Image (cartoon, grey):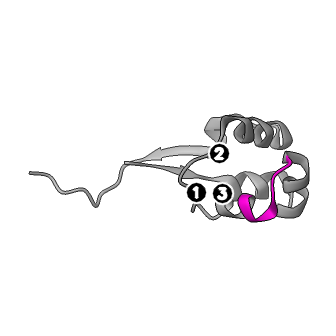
Amino acid sequence: MMIVINLDVMMAKRKIGLTELAGKVGITLANLSILKNNKAKAVRLETLDAICKALDCQPGDILEYVEDNTEETN
């Protein structure tokens, strides 16, 4: 089980680039890139709120729960 961050999909739908979104959200380009590339271990609710405002979307448009098929069953 894991949470996938679909920020790149939402950015493409809204036709907004990384630099522009980073400016609107108020976080560094490097940190936004980590989120976009699904490398983040955590995201602050304050950051998620700012991203949702900037992209005019809901958290569920960005965050997705998916089953992880690599788990072993005993």
**For this view, does 17 lie left or right of residue 70?**
right
Question: Pointers 3 and 2 in contact (CB under 8 A)?
Answer: no
Between disc 3 and disc 2, the foreground one is 3
Of 29 and 12, nearer the camera is 29
Q: Quadrant of residue 22?
A: bottom right
| Residue bearing mark 2 | 62
Task: Tell me whether circle 1 and circle 3 mark residues in contact (CB < 8 Å).
Answer: yes
Circle 1 Cα neighbour tier, 10 Å, few/some/many (<14 / 14–19 / ≥20):
some
* Residue drawn at the location 73% of the way across and 36% of the way down: 46
Q: CA distance from mark 1 to mark 3?
A: 5 Å
Q: How many marks?
A: 3
Residue 61 vs 19, above or below: the answer is above
Q: Residue at x 53, y 53 (%)?
A: 41
**Comes first in the chain, label 2 or label 1:** 1
Q: Give how far apart the Cα atoms at labels 2 and 1 are.
A: 13 Å
**In the picture shown, does residue 53 fall above or below 10?**
above
Proximity of marks 2 and 1: CB atoms separated by less than 8 Å: no
Residue furthest left in the image: 74
- From the image, tell me which residue sits under label 3: 35
Disc 2 or disc 1, which is closer to the eye?
Answer: 1
Q: Nearer the viewer, residue 21 or 41?
A: 41
Query: Dot 2: within a 10 Å radius of its alpha carbon, few (fewer than 14), some, or many (20 or more) residues?
Result: many
Identify the residue at horizontal 35%, vertical 54% (top origin).
68
Magenta part of the protein: which range? 26-31
SS class, disc 2: helix
The first of marks 1 and 3 along the sequence is 3
Task: Tell me residue 40's x, y (percent).
Answer: 58, 57
Query: What residue is pinned by disc 1?
Result: 40
At label 2, the amino acid type is Ile
Residue 15 at x, y = what percent? 86, 57
